[in-house]
Image (tube, rainbow, N blue to C red):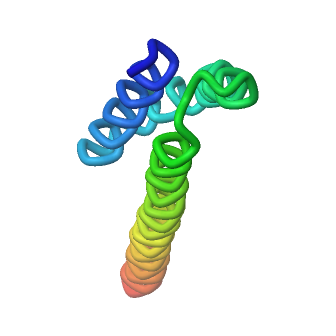
Amino acid sequence: MSEALDALDRLTAQLEDALASEDWERLGELNNLVGETVEPVMQALEQRQLDATAVQSRLQQLQRFCSEADTRAREVREEASRALKSVNQNNSAARAYRNVSSDKGK
């Protein structure tokens, strides 16, 4: 196997690990490396140094990862949004209670 495919395999594994641990910062850092990691694979493929089936398999794996990561990121964003709405509702209820309580003292 070529160094380019090895590098792509390592990057894919690191991406999967970062997603599994929900390390969004690391995921972003690794995401920035995808283009520069895939480029040598594609160049080697064009020069017929790599088997097209092997490259296709790796790229499909990377595509599946991207879809999974996108889905998970959306889920986490929605969870955070619901949590924020809940906090805002609790704050509003607390303010309303304070206002009612302070009016009784008058």
The residue at the point 51 percent across, 18 percent down is: 4
The residue at the point 44 percent across, 62 percent down is: 68
Is 32 on the left-hand or right-hand side of 15? right
Q: Residue 82 in the image: x percent, y percent?
A: 44, 75
Question: Which residue is most to the front?
Answer: 48
Q: Nearer the viewer, residue 91 or 31?
A: 31
Label count reads 0
Q: Is residue 21 above or below residue 11?
A: below
Q: Is residue 66 above or below residue 36?
A: below
Q: Residue 3 in the image: x percent, y percent?
A: 45, 12
Q: Nearer the viewer, residue 94 or 18?
A: 18
The residue at the point 35 percent across, 45 percent down is: 19
Quadrant holding the N terminus: top left
Is 19 on the left-hand or right-hand side of 40? left
Q: Residue 54 in the image: x percent, y percent?
A: 46, 42
Regarding residue 39, the answer to whether it shows in the image is yes
Q: Nearer the viewer, residue 95 or 74?
A: 74
Quadrant holding the C terminus: bottom left
Q: Is residue 70 above or below residue 82?
A: above
Q: Residue 84 in the image: x percent, y percent?
A: 46, 66
Q: Nearer the viewer, residue 31 or 80?
A: 31
Regarding residue 91, the answer to whether it shows in the image is no
